[in-house]
Image (tube, helix red, strand yellow):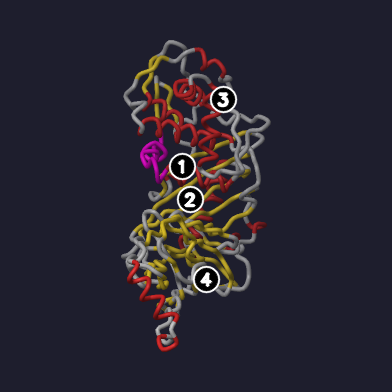
Amino acid sequence: MKRFISWCASLSLLCTGLSHAAILNIDPASVPAAAWTIFDPQSGQTIAEFNSHAQRAPASLTKMMVAYITLKEIKAGKLKRTDILTANDVVKVVQPDESQMFLRSGQKISIDQLLSGLVVMSANDAAVTLAQRIGGDLPHFVEMMNQEAKALGMTDTHFTNPAGITMDGHYSSAADMAKLGNALIEQYPDYLYYSKQTSYSWNNHPHHATNILLTQDPTVDGLKTGFTRAAGFNLALTAKRPTMNPNLPERRLIVVVLGTTSPVMRAEVAHRLMNLAYNYTRDDVAIKAKQPIAELPVISGQIKSYTITPDQNKVITTSLYQQPVAIDMRSFDSSNGLLKLNGAFLQPVSNSSTTLQVQLQQQQLTAPLNQNMQLATIKIYQNNQWVEDVKINRHVALEQATWWERLWIWVKHTLPFFKTDAVVPAKIFPLS
């Protein structure tokens, strides 16, 4: 299979993927949740989703943002895990029926203990105590939460409190919670230290983690559960599993399910979606680092051509399900991780059917040049279905040729007997 690709992935490169089609076509009627998404952090692609941008009550998934800001403060040196603070009257805003550590005014507690209480115990008193310590008061901390949400591109989200209490104007989406979960793992992987704890006890108040998959699947290491009557039972789930690909030895997935009917149901739905994605999709290196991809002619420059080569591998997610019918999750057998179709178990296909094609935005470059430019767009197809457009932008710096060299170029391109020495057109390298 030939792939025509133009990809730039240098440190100064900005690549924006606009995904418009799912990798797996799952029948939403077969998934008992109000909204859900399966996200692959390696490729940045959404494997499958339903109502993933619907604004819903996130409940205690909100606390992932509290943890995000707290860990950011720690990384910036503004806090230490060992810092001891004294709980004050802010804990009195927590009602008796809310999840809590049972903090009382005057008690001393460390930031590390508060993070464990926040994530494992889903403690609202831990949330408001951290919020007041970092923001000075709750309203200012909520402003910080919304600023961070905007910076992360969480366009379906607005927070009004740090604990996840149901309030007007407090909402998020499955897609946004997947973004937040991914940011936590990528920027502050220490979060997983807390989210993989199966239990935590403080001041003789023990609590077992409500993410029951932590004790059922050793590859699961987070992220957060949530429940209110308005939200239903929510779960942001992640796992990392080994692969058979030496180029990508490990693979992480993130699944978010919102609005299920019980703690068992949210775990079952999320785990089945995750297992399906692991078994019926694969991550492939579409283009290797340092491999020449395309060549653009340079006019009046010290160099005659500009070669586009990536500094990093470009990973894409490939579907291993090539049936024309939508996936019915009720036919997924959890014991062997396979779908049943027409009475027989369906094995994942072994060959990739991914095709990448390039559209160059620049046919040539003219020196001098020192600016950010969009060079190309990669169109990704799987099973003849368009999945994603990736815009390729990078900073291009080209020095101008000397006046003598520019004169000679003009002569060669102007005089009739030099006409054969024309500018070579842009070239895209075919790869197989």
Q: What stretch is highlighted in magenta?
A: 185-199
State the image coordinates of residue 1 (x, y, percent, origin top left).
Answer: 45, 80
Mark number for residue 98? 3
For the residues marked 3 and 1, what is the alpha-carbon distance in whole angstroms? 20 Å
Q: Nearer the viewer, mark 3 or mark 1?
A: 1
Q: Nearer the viewer, mark 2 or mark 4?
A: 4
Mark number for residue 254? 2
Q: Do residues under tags 2 and 1 come within 8 Å of each other at their CB atoms?
A: yes
Q: Is residue 37 above or below residue 428?
A: above
State the image coordinates of residue 24 (x, y, percent, origin top left).
Answer: 56, 64
Q: What's the amino acid at mark 1?
A: Leu
Q: What's the amino acid at mark 2?
A: Ile
Mark number for residue 223? 1
For the residues marked 3 and 2, what is the alpha-carbon distance in whole angstroms? 27 Å
Quarter occupied by residue 86: top left
Crowding around mark 2 (Cα neighbors within 10 Å: few <14, some 14 to 19, many 20+) is many
Q: Earlier in the sequence, mark 2 or mark 4?
A: 2
